Amino acid sequence: MKKIINTTKAPAPIGPYNQATLIGDFLYTSGQIAMVPETNELKTANIKEETNLVMQHLQAILSEAEMTFNNVVKVSIFISDMNNFSQINEVYAQYFSEENAPARETVEVARLPKNVNVEISLIAHKKA
């Protein structure tokens, strides 16, 4: 059975989608960007702060689904400039231990929604 997951602690969707979908024990999140939920203001001036805000949104969605980053099995990171990879990775590493880190890909793309610098989505499993 499909259950829609939404929280006010992450930005509201800007299109016909939800923040996440829970199917059985699997949670699939939509890509998150650095938008302040209360104001819809973008925070893109500093790549580390931008990445941290994105990770906080994902953490809020996981929490709404009664999960944590320990439940994450797969992450997709989309960035507008591969030169930002090491700074993004530095922030990302604060949310995962090396022994429990999920599978991941990082892809440079031509453009992201609202011209942000990073967008991250994930898949989590309740029993992971």
Image (cartoon, rainbow, N blue to C red):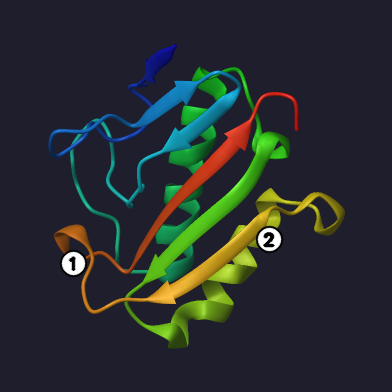
Q: Residue at x 60, y 62 (%)?
A: 104
Work out whether residue 64 or residue 40 is closer to the camera in this orientation and state it. 64
Residue 60 seen in the current view: no
Residue 124 seen in the current view: yes
The quarter of the picture where the C terminus appears is top right
Q: Gap in Å between the C-alphas at discs 2 and 1?
A: 24 Å
From this view, report whether residue 29 is shown above or below residue 83. Answer: above
Q: Residue at x 40, y 16 (%)?
A: 2
Q: Amino acid at mark 1?
A: Asn
Tell me the element at label 1. helix
For marks 2 and 1 on the same chain, the one whose residue lies earlier in the sequence: 2
Tell me the element at label 2. helix
Single out the residue that lies furthest toward the front. Answer: 1
Q: Amino acid at mark 2?
A: Ala
What residue did someone put label 1 on?
Answer: 115
What residue did someone put label 2 on?
Answer: 93
Work out whether residue 1 or residue 89 is closer to the camera in this orientation and state it. 1
- In the rendering, at what x and y percent does residue 92 appear? 60, 59
Work out whether residue 47 or residue 78 is closer to the camera in this orientation and state it. 78
The crowd level at tag 2 (other Cα within 10 Å; few <14, some 14-19, many 20+) is: few
Left or right? Give the position of 54 relative to 63. left
Snapshot quadrant of residue 111: bottom left
Q: Residue at x 54, y 35 (%)?
A: 59
Snapshot quadrant of residue 113: bottom left
From this view, report whether residue 76 is shown above or below residue 31. Answer: below
Left or right? Give the position of 114 relative to 120. left
Q: Residue at x 36, y 82 (%)?
A: 81
